[in-house]
Image (cartoon, rainbow, N blue to C red):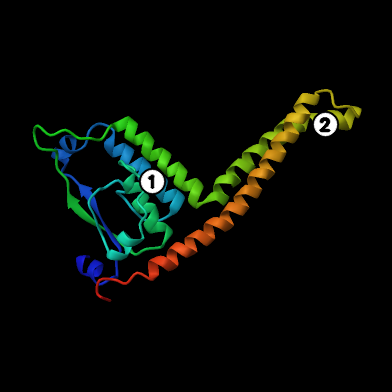
Amino acid sequence: LVDKLIDGRLDMVVGCRATAEQERDAAYRAGHQFGNKLLTHSVVQLFGGGFTDMLSGYRVFSRRFVKSFPALSGGFEIETELTVHALQLRMPCAEATTTYRGRPDGSVSKLNTYRDGIRILWTIFKLFKAEKPLVFFLVGFVLCVVAALILAAPLALTYIQTGLVPRLPTAILSSGLALLGFLSLACGLILDTVTRGRIETKRLAYLQIPSIRAE
């Protein structure tokens, strides 16, 4: 893997942390393994890829990756940004199993389970909205239209039977939700075009960066 990284065939190698059964409790605090799997699975489902330990800090990068990565996060969200950046630009990546043991006596982890977990989840949400706007706003469109149809169905039946609309506020709410849904769809279509152009620009800039061997 190191040779492939050096000659430009890989852009990122992630060290998947593996612990012996008897050392697992010392290496991972309660909930960390579950949280890692949950967040990793969320990123894989939203952005693709086959990562199994997205939050691992054991990483090696190529020159191309480093020069093309705009670091925006200032905390433990950085691993999520690194992973999504690689997936977005379709960079060749690999995983290698590494040994992970408990911290030495007297040292304290800077990771706050709940606070940093929420921050990472919020980062995934923001990246999903920014990088896949059509899917993001399509969800809003479906929710709004379904809610509008549920509210409008009994009104439509009453109108067919009596020719009257007895609950005008409900009719206005239903119409507003439908309009909001189609507005969400329009935003998704527009932003998807903008995002596609931005990704193409980033991809071309990334491909222009020579590998170490090319120099």
Between marks 1 and 2 in the image, the one whose residue lies nearer the viewer? 1
Front residue of 211/174: it is 211
- Number of dots carrying numbers: 2
Asked if marks 1 and 2 touch (Cβ < 8 Å), the reply is: no
The three-letter amino acid code for the residue at tag 2 is Leu
Q: Which mark is on residue 145?
A: none
Residue 73 figure quarter: top left
The three-letter amino acid code for the residue at tag 1 is His
Which percent across, then down, holds residue 190?
A: 62, 53
Residue carrying label 2: 157
Residue 165 figure quarter: top right
The structure residue drawn at horizontal position 31% and vertical position 50%, both measured from the top left corner, is 52
Q: Is residue 163 above or below residue 122?
A: above
Residue 34 figure quarter: top left
Front residue of 114/96: it is 114
Which percent across, then down, holds residue 69?
A: 35, 57
Which percent across, then down, holds residue 203?
A: 43, 65
Q: Is residue 54 above or below residue 89?
A: above
Residue carrying label 1: 41
